[in-house]
Image (cartoon, rainbow, N blue to C red):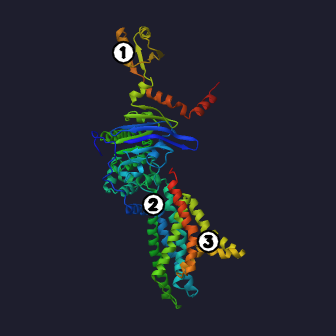
Amino acid sequence: MIKVEGLSRAYGSFMAVDDISFVCKPGTVTGFLGPNGAGKTTTMRVMVGLTSPTAGEVTIGGLHFHDIPNPGRHVGVLLDASAQHAGRTGREVLTIGAKTMGLPMSRVDEMLALVSLDDTESKRRVRNYSLGMRQRLGIAHALLGDPSVLILDEPANGLDPAGIRWMRGLLKGYADRGGTVLLSSHLLNEVEQIADEMLLIGRGKIVARGTKAELLAGAGGVGTLVVAEDNNLLTAALTDKGLTFTPVGLGFRVDAMPVDVGRVAAERSVVLSDLRPVEGGLEDLFLELTSDTQREDFAQAATTAGAPS
Amino acid sequence: MSTATSAPMTLDVSQTDRVPFSRLVSVELRKMFDTRAGRWLLISIAAFTALVLIIQLWVVLAQDQTVTFEDFAAGANIPMNILLPVLGVMSVTSEWSQRTAMVTFTLEPSRTRFLAAKFVGTLIVALAAVVIGFTLTIAANGLYAAFSDNPVTWDLGAFRIFCFFLLYVFSMATGFAFGMLLLNTAAAIVVYFVYSFIFPGLFELGSALMDWFQDLRPWIDFANAQNPIIEADVTGKEWAQLAVSGFIWLVLPLVIGVWRVLRAEVK
């Protein structure tokens, strides 16, 4: 539904987005992940025509955004929840949207109810909204025209844990009804539970893509934490099978799937007291893939300098 | 929304029409009134106009002066000339300073249509200002007729009303143009006031010092060229001077401003 082809955007000599291509399919949630400044927002801005591409193009449902009549009815957009007039009430913000799109005013009340902004809150000025409330208002605005495509930049930003869970359910349900969702985040755990497909972007380039399982398998980042009743028996068995491992805590971290480790243990009749996939494997992968693009060099230098010698 | 089973890769836009221009205009008009700043600016335009006319009337009656309908019209033009441009500036710049342009352009991607709708919206406000300004002028002249023994003139012709409209449109449109040029409320208002209060003095000084400038001035001083309009008595040459100076100070900024908005990246 959303098709990005060879998209680049340069600011002077700086490549904000560097030749990226991907497709978002109907009925799926695509998570767009990357550290701050990786090019997520620029890509989304090009999608909706706020920024012109240096090369390549984006089409939504086969059309350029400019050519979609009354685009609010087809593509729901939330790029920055704070980009609202501070002096307007939440209700007024939605009313302006509904009037532009030619929707009945009842739609405003429906959306306010959907994002749980009550009557008093909706009559307060956006200036007095918390970031979470602005985010809810922004999501309500994006959904106003009942679009079939949603483009959301950092929608979970500022939401409390309950709010994040609520949004997850909302977007999941939306995709299950056939909608296309593209959402960005710099936090892996916000995305990994709802995204059917993930795109990892760093320094303007897509560094990895696929489902969670594919990403883990592809990067060889799979691992198993295992503890045996008799660890000596286990290490012998693992060594015989040619599996590499490192001691971790009471047991080992094995570079293999849990099922393989379990099989080895079963063959040798080793009793296991713990067997589980390495948690945060995706996180490691995420950090590793985007590490050279992170802005942590300075932080690291500062830590080193500040460390007692 | 389509169902998951069919899941088409294209958008069906055959049932959707473009946002009609009239709807864009009405939304832009609404945006001028729906914030405290916008509402109070409109109220203060009317209030200041009334205030200026009351003071003028007070002075005229107290000193037993003879004034014409045009004198009151000129009085009403002072606050309008100061505040209408501010409204013009703000209608454009608030989209940038409040960053609502990001939302506006995702609902109407054609910036040309957006600007046209905004401009028509400000013209409608200028029309409303004409009605208010004219009503207040008539009221002031009526009070003058009631309380003064001096001769009273009434000039309510269509041309007079047209001149009113022209003046207010010039004010509003100049502010609109400066707003587009700078896309920043404070900067645009400051630059506008420099243009409208400091430039006339410089023009005056220049023509006093240099003979050649004195001949040139009527053709490049837009504020000066509007004086015949205030008096609703315009000769052919004066129309030409208005057109030339208006091209420099109104049309040119408008064109460059539009060009800027069409190209500006919305942050």
The crowd level at tag 3 (other Cα within 10 Å; few <14, some 14-19, many 20+) is many
Residue B19 in percent (x, y) is at 37, 58
Q: Give the CA distance from mark 2 to mark 1.
A: 66 Å
Question: According to the image, label 2 marks what residue?
Answer: B35
Residue A219 in percent (x, y) is at 45, 25
What element does badge 2 sit on?
loop
Residue B229 picture quarter: bottom right
The crowd level at tag 2 (other Cα within 10 Å; few <14, some 14-19, many 20+) is some
Q: Residue furthest right?
A: B209
Quadrant that contains the C terminus of chain A: top right
What element does badge 3 sit on?
helix
Question: According to the image, label 3 marks what residue?
Answer: B220
User: The disc labelled 2 sits on which kind of residue?
Assistant: Thr
Of labels 2 and 3, the one closer to you: 3
User: The disc labelled 1 sits on which kind of residue?
Assistant: Gly
Label 2 and label 3 in one chain? yes
Of labels 1 and 3, the one closer to you: 3
Q: Give the CA distance from mark 1 to mark 3.
A: 90 Å
In this rendering, would A123 be left or right of B206? Answer: left
Question: According to the image, label 1 marks what residue?
Answer: A262
| Letter of the chain that mark 3 sits on in the rendering | B
